[in-house]
Image (cartoon, rainbow, N blue to C red):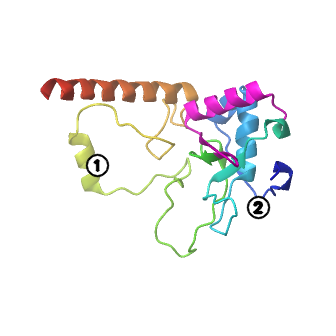
Amino acid sequence: MTYDTIAIPGGFIKLMRSDATRELLRDGPAFQLLTQIALRAKRTNDFNVHGLQIGQALIGDYASCGLTRRKYRTAMAHLERYGLARFQATHRGTIATLLDITIYDINEEQASPHSDQRPANKRPTEGHQAATIKNEKNEKKEKKGPPVCFSGSGPGVRSATGGLPTFAEMDRQRAACALAKAQEEFLNDDQA
């Protein structure tokens, strides 16, 4: 199998105008690789000979996006660290999975157009707020403890300016979560 035979599916992808996008543009190789993943990502549940799921793309041909092998591996590491993509090596190539729609939305097509459920990675747009139940709000206020750890960008994930968080803010949040988790494990080990 060659990567020349992999067709880029029709349709469109949305590039979000945000601070995170502008920040990723400064990391050219990571932006190039994320663009290639978004263009190649499977967006429907149609049959796929490679067994890809929605949001996954077969990559591994660093030369096709104009990168050296070293820049390609560095870009992969950056995208994983930013929480934008996950990579899994297989004997057929590397499968990249989009984890977040902070930069690109691949316009995933859902199985049933009349489904009452929102997909897990579709979030309200920046000007809208997700509907919440009042009891859930009260429970959240009562809970005190370590920072809430999350992955991806959801309606509760905002920067200090109210927009989408920058990668530096995302890194700080992940570090705070890792510290809280380590402290909790330490305390649990002490009690055992």
User: Observer-nearest residue: 131 or 47?
Assistant: 47
Residue extending furthest toward the left: 191
Q: For the point 67% across and 35% down, which residue is it?
A: 21
Mark 2 lies on a secondary structure that is loop
- Disc number placed over residue 137 in the picture, else none: 1
Q: Amino acid at mark 1?
A: Lys
Q: For the point 49% across and 56% down, which residue is it?
A: 120
Determine if the magenta segment contains residue 80: yes
User: Observer-nearest residue: 155 or 81?
Assistant: 81
Where is residue 136 drawn, in percent x and y? 28, 52
- Say left or right for 188 vs 98: left
- Say left or right for 34 vs 182: right
Compared with 78, 126 (above or below) is below
Determine if the magenta segment contains residue 167: no
- Disc number placed over residue 11 in the picture, else none: 2
Which of the 4 image quarters holds residue 46?
bottom right
Disc nearest the viewer among 1 and 2: 2
Range covered by the magenta-colored residues: 66-95
Tag 1 near tag 2, CB within 8 Å:
no
- Say left or right for 123 vs 142: right
Compared with 25, 107 (above or below) is below
Q: Amino acid at mark 2?
A: Gly
Bin the neighbour count of mark 1 within 10 Å (Cα to Cα): few under 14, some 14-19, many 20 and up: few
